[in-house]
Amino acid sequence: MVARYFVSPRRGRRGYSDIASALDAAAGRGRAARVEIAPGRYEEALTVRGDVELVAVDGPGSVVVHRPRGTVLEASGAARVHGLVLIGRDADVVDCRAGTLTLEHSEVRAHNGVSVRGRPNTAVTLRDSAIRHGRTLFAGAGGLIERCRFSDAADNAVAVIEGARVAVRDSWIGGSRIHGVRVSDARAEVTGCELTGTGKAALVADTQAELTVSGCTIHAVDAEAVMFIEQSRGSVDGARVTDTQHGIAVASGADPVVRGCTLTACRDTGINVQTSGRGRFEDCEVLAAGNVAVLSTQGGAPEVHGCRISGGNVGIAVTDAARGRFTRVEIGDLTSVALRVSDDAKAVFEQVRVERCPSGLETRGGAGTTAEVSDSRFRDFGMSAAEVLGHSRVTLKGVVAERGRLGFGVGEDAQLFAYGCAVEGVSSGGALGFGRARLVARNLTVTGSEAFGLCGLGSAYLDVADSGFVDCAAAGASFDEKCAGRLADCSVDGTQGVAVQHNGRVELVSLRTSLAVVTKEPEPAEPAPTTVNNFIGPVFHREVSGTQLAWNNHDVIQQQTDEDGSRA
């Protein structure tokens, strides 16, 4: 049977004037106890031993326990607190040293200290409570947080460290100076929570931690919404992120799984993977990202499947020796390029759909910069569907470019390989090679170009076979300047322009066409520069000695000298 104790500042019959006295009496009897506390402000330290329940009889907020310094409530055993307000400074306001502790409908205020501490091998439950200013710390402890409110923590609102296991559910976390929830070398589940106004990442997992996030809303954060670093693992499902610097960030060997998230108006990046970070991202949306929707950089290697990107600046960027595989991605309405690969990065794009962007694919960098694009479509692009520059290498398989300026362009020292690709309705041309670039195409079809189907400039080399050019207004193929190459087993059909206009450096093999083939005469070599020798002065046809010479002088003074050079 539970023993009952009543506490009131006015101390009625058989009551106690302070809570500590009632707790001492309960501890002396060694049985389960219920301490009922009348409204009031109590300035004392509470030590709970055994099976004890502390209850504010007039409901939550009616009992305030306060200490100017030091711990307010220390618990060992099976402690339950209902409806109390606990206020402390410069210490752990609530300290669970052993056993279990449950706080319900309570409030904890920690000024320059820890609000609630769960020590190793303890279990702390917070339910329907408010935690202000100080952090809640689980160090090697078990924890459950339900329907709580954490506000204005001086550092982390909730810290789960040193092997702790904690679940946070349906709670609000706001205004933390550092993180909302930090998980380090521990495990945490965060479900159905709202996080806002944190100084750094709202949710972070580090030091091989495991973090599971489900159904959370995160907004107005100065840094990342969710961050996985230092070989941490976990998952994020159904998160809604708005107005953060980065949506979901992965770095330093971390490898989470992210599904069904919507990342809106991130000021820099929606998904950011770097420094050997990995991660699998499925069925996510990135809307109106300020800089890059999906960024893989500095050795990152994400896999992105079923992603939708709309609005913002750059769609997907893979840079600085990073990698990435992107499948079933839809990109539209950007102000810059949809796909960018640069600086020795490597990317694979499959089943990508790009609409209404200035550029489709852009690559630039050293020979280690490669991109593979297959079964993809670029539509309504302002400049080009693919632009390959530097020393980069790109392979296109089954790629369709519709309605834009230029289909595929390769320049400088880059290489472009196109297999089974098609270009339709472009204003400038289907495929262009310039500089010292190399273009290899098989089964390429260009239809309805308002200029050329295929064009080579500079010292580019074009090797095109089994391809067709239809209704190209100016020329099916044009080879100018010092461009060289081969056009084999190709056809040019239409009613205007010429079939091929070339410079005599291109081999034409089995060309099928009813249009004219025009060979441009090589431009005459520039004449050698004329050398003019202008001799001013006398010309000598024999050896001359003992002679004095002067020219272009208005006044000449002659003086005779001896053999030693002195005047005669």
Image (spheres, rainbow, N blue to C red):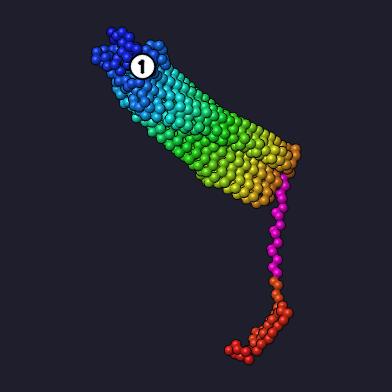
Location of the C terminus (image quadrant): bottom right
**Where is residue 411 drawn, in percent x and y?**
61, 46
Q: Residue at x 65, y 89 (%)?
A: 560
Query: What secondary structure is marked by label 1?
Result: strand
Q: Main secondary structure of the magenta part?
A: loop
Taking the magenta stretch, the answer to whether it contains residue 10 is no
- Is residue 63 shown to the viewer in this render? yes
Q: Residue 453, how many percent across, how many down?
A: 68, 40
The residue type indicated by label 1 comes to Val
Q: Residue furthest bottom?
A: 568
Q: Is residue 530 magenta?
A: yes
Q: In the image as oriented, which residue stretches furthest toward the front? A: 10
State the image coordinates of residue 17 (x, y, percent, origin top left). 32, 14
Give the quadrant of the N terminus. Answer: top left
Q: Looking at the image, which residue is at 38% across and 33% down?
A: 207
Residue at the location (24% across, 13% down)?
29
Q: In this picture, which residue range is highlighted in magenta? A: 517-532
**485 or 473: which is nearer to us?**
473
Q: Quadrant of residue 350?
A: top right
Out of 402 and 266, give the one closest to the viewer. Answer: 266
Determine if residue 514 is in view.
Answer: no
Residue at the disc numbered 1: 81
Q: Residue at x 67, y 51 (%)?
A: 481
Q: Is residue 351 left or right of residue 70?
A: right
Assess disc 1: are there few (<14), some (14-19) or many (≥20) residues with their C-alpha within 10 Å of its C-alpha. many
